[in-house]
Image: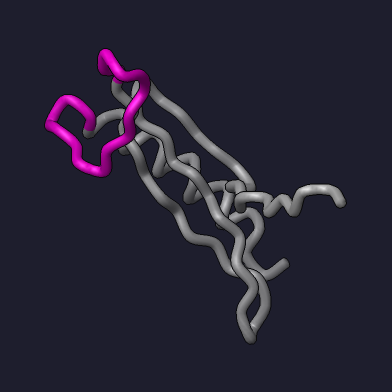
C-alpha cells in the first residue's frame, strides 16, 4: 500500500524584496474566491533559515514594496 501523502497548501503568488516576502493565498467563500496575504521576514541562524512576523524600521521600505505588488496582483483579479 502506498503511503498517504497530504499536500501542504501553497500560496498562489509570492513577492520578495530583501528579506521580506508577501505570500498570497486563495480561499473560496460563499461569494466566490477571495485572497489573504501573509508577510514574513527571513533570517539565517546557525540552525538554518527562520521566519518571523515582526519587523524593524529597516524593513519598512521592503514591506511597502511587497505589499504594493500584492495589492496590484489581487486588485487585477478582483471580480473573477
- Locate residue 64 relative to residue 37 in the image: left or right: left
The number of discs equals 0
Percent x, y of residue 23: 49, 44
Seen at 68% across and 50% down, the residue is 7
Q: In this view of the protein, which residue sits in the foreground, 45 or 3?
A: 3
Q: Which is more toward the observer, 23 or 46? A: 46
Decide if residue 1 is on the left or right side of residue 78.
Answer: right
Q: Picture quarter containing residue 20? A: top left
Can you give x and y, in whole percent of width and height, for residue 69 in the image?
49, 40
- Judge whether 3 appears above or below 55 on screen: below
Where does the image place residue 78, in percent across and percent down from the top left?
62, 64
Q: Is residue 57 above or below residue 76?
A: above
What is the span of residues highlighted in magenta in the rendered image? 44-59
Find out whether residue 46 is within the magenta segment.
yes
Is 53 magenta? The answer is yes
The residue nearer to you, when weighing 71 against 15, is 15
Determine the residue positioned at 32% across, 29% down. Answer: 50
Q: Quadrant of the C terminus?
A: bottom right
Q: Identify the residue at the far top of this view.
A: 46
Relative vertical location of residue 51 with respect to residue 39 in this rendering, above or below: above
* Residue displayed at 22% across by 34% down: 60
Residue at 61 percent across and 60 percent down: it is: 26
Q: Residue furthest bottom?
A: 30
Is residue 41 left or right of 80 when viewed as pictured? left
Instruction: Give the farthest residue toward the left.
Output: 57
For residue 74, which quarter of the picture? bottom right
Spot occupied by residue 18 in the image (x, y as percentages of width and height): 36, 20
Amino acid at each position: 500500500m502506498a503511503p498517504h501523502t497530504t499536500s501542504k497548501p501553497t500560496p498562489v503568488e509570492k513577492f520578495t524584496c530583501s528579506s521580506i516576502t508577501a505570500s498570497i493565498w486563495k480561499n473560496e467563500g460563499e461569494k466566490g474566491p477571495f485572497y489573504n496575504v501573509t508577510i514574513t521576514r527571513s533570517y539565517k541562524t546557525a540552525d538554518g533559515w527562520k521566519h518571523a512576523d515582526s519587523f524593524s524600521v529597516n524593513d519598512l521600505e521592503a514591506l511597502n514594496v511587497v505589499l504594493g505588488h500584492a495589492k496590484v496582483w489581487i486588485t487585477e483579479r478582483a471580480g473573477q
